[in-house]
Image (cartoon, rainbow, N blue to C red):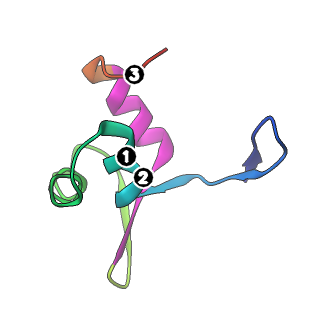
Amino acid sequence: MSTNEKGTPQSRTYTVNDIAAILGIGRASAYKLANSGLFKTIRIGNMIRISRKSFEDWLRAEGLDEE
């Protein structure tokens, strides 16, 4: 796990709520997107975790990144 500039751990995954906040969409839409197969996800019980790298690569490909 890497750390950000403040020294706090940076997770290698996002939650569905994280991607909803990043994209400015509702949770239901974020769940549909997470289940769409557009980026890598991991299911742990009933939780979904989204690969940070895969999601950020998808954002860049879609032209939605802010960099």
Which of marks 3 and 1 precedes in the sequence?
1
x%, y% of residue 28? 16, 60
Secondary structure of the residue carrying tag 1 is helix
Question: Is 9 placed left or right of 63 in the picture?
Answer: right
Q: Which of the 4 quarters of the picture holds residue 39?
A: top left
Label pair 1/2, CB-CB below 8 angstroms: yes
Q: Residue at x 43, y 18 (%)?
A: 66
x%, y% of residue 58? 33, 32
Q: CA distance from mark 1 to mark 2?
A: 5 Å
The residue segment tinted magenta is: 47-60
Main SS of the magenta part reads helix
x%, y% of residue 19? 36, 48
**Structural crowding at the residue carrying mark 1, measured as other residues with C-alpha within 10 Å and reported as few (<14), some (14–19) or many (≥20):** few
Residue 21's disc is 1
Q: Residue at x 80, y 34 (%)?
A: 5
Q: Residue furthest bottom?
A: 45
**Structural crowding at the residue carrying mark 2, measured as other residues with C-alpha within 10 Å and reported as few (<14), some (14–19) or many (≥20):** some
Secondary structure of the residue carrying tag 3 is loop
**Structural crowding at the residue carrying mark 3, measured as other residues with C-alpha within 10 Å and reported as few (<14), some (14–19) or many (≥20):** few
In terms of depth relative to the viewer, which is nearer, 17 or 59?
17
Question: Is 49 placed left or right of 7 in the picture?
Answer: left
Residue at the disc numbered 2: 18
Q: Residue at x 31, y 49 (%)?
A: 20
What kind of residue is marked 1?
Ala
Residue at the disc numbered 3: 65
Front tag of 1 and 3: 1
What kind of residue is marked 3?
Asp
x%, y% of residue 51? 45, 51
